[in-house]
Image: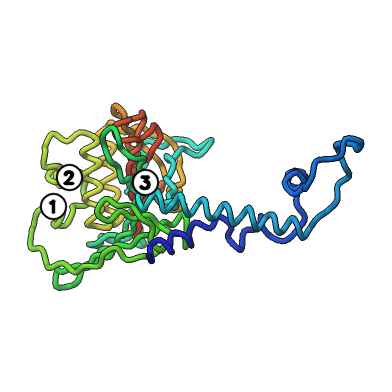
Amino acid sequence: MADELELLRRANPVPSADPRFREGPLPPGAERHLDLLTRRAAPAPNRPARRPHVPRPRRAHLAWAVVTAAVVAVTALALLLAGPATPSAVAAPRPLTPVAGSAPVSLERLAERARTAAGEDASPRLRQGTHVQSWSLSMTSGPDARRPVTLPEERVVRWRPDGSRTELVVATDPRRPGQPVVTDPGGDPRTVDDGHVLSRVTLPPSWSDAPPWARPPHDARGLRAYLDELDRAGGQDTPRLLDAVAELLDHWTLGGRESAALAQVLADAGGLRPAGGVTDRLGRPGQAYTHSAPGIRRMIVLAPDTGAVLGLETTFTKDQPDLAVKAGDVMAYRAWMR
């Protein structure tokens, strides 16, 4: 019963703080509709059909209360009948697009900038652990596939001196602070409060000396070999290279030298097209580089001065009815922070 009550509370479409529903006069259109709804009898034949406007403030407020109550009831009924598989707090991110008038910067040029920044005393240092905000689609497949919902999560991994690590995962969406967040426990989407802890674990030390546990090199050649080892399928192409980069960044927060080396690896690999300046989902300026494959577009966003990877986005570029996705749906987006 608690779940149903919570759904009813969240179904109220008229927040008390919404400026649209404060006390005040109704607009002309609403007055006309209210006049028609509250008119008790049709005009007499010997009277004109149109009569002068008479303000009815008390009746207007009563009518709004009746309409509001009806909307709340209908919305709540729809939520209860639809069940938790259709949460209303979904706000799917749109694909990132270049800032109008921004000039694309080649990866080679960006790598040069990153090397310059890495030589400064204030350049950040390599750190084991990660802080990442992600948005990903929860999809089903088949003829009865439901429209996907977007699951926002924030994950913080910190390492201890003894080699153990803690991992905290919370449901939060920085684009909608304080608003309910969709989560998907066991394939059953539902909403939780912003900041709801999804998991908190402590993991024992790993004594592996292979990537991604091994310390990443800070030169381009060594880092490329490191990423090749992460790509267990071998024969790394651009999509698999980007997957390996994501795995690296899910374990390490790169320093200035490692970011410069990674920018050079991406420049040497080819396959990424400069797309121009973008503002990422956390409001940070970046330079975007894209790779297109049938039905999919990958975009990596790098800091314009240091070459640090800010984000990685995968977007559907064509409808896929078997997954109930449409062109322009963002399959996944990850934003890494220090």
Residue 194, placed above or below residue 28: below
Judge from the rendering whether residue 80 lies leftward or rightward of residue 188; answer left or right: right
Q: Which residue is mark 2?
A: 227
Q: Secondary structure at mark 2?
A: helix
Q: In screen coordinates, is 145 left or right of 206?
A: right
Q: Amino acid at mark 1?
A: Pro
Residues at marks 1 and 3, CA–CA distance in whole angstroms: 33 Å
| Label 3 residue SS | strand
Precedes in sequence: disc 3 or disc 2: 3
Residues packed near mark 3 inside 10 Å, few (<14), some (14 to 19) or many (20 plus) = many
Give residue 277's position: percent from left, percent from top: 45, 40
C-alpha distance separating marks 2 and 1: 8 Å
Foreground of the two, 17 or 265: 17
**In this orientation, which residue lies closer to the viewer: 44 or 22?**
44
Three-letter residue code for mark 2:
Leu
Check whether the beta carbons of the residues at disc 2 and disc 1 lie within 8 A of each other: yes
Q: Disc 1 marks which residue?
A: 211
Residue in view at x 12 percent, y 45 percent: 229
What amino acid type is highlighted by mark number 3? Answer: Val
> What residue is at 29 percent from the left and 26 percent from the top?
294
> Residue 42, percent across and down?
80, 41
Is residue 116 shown to the viewer in this render? no
Distance between the alpha carbons at the discs numbered 3 and 2: 32 Å
Residue neighbourhood size for the residue with mark 1, other residues' Cα within 10 Å, grouped as few (<14), some (14–19), many (≥20): some
Frontmost residue, 11 versus 316 = 11
Residue on which disc 3 sits: 149
Which x, y percent locates residue 61? 72, 58
Whether residue 9 is visible to the viewer of this picture, yes or no, is: yes
Residue at the spot 34% in from the left edge and 46% down from the top edge: 333
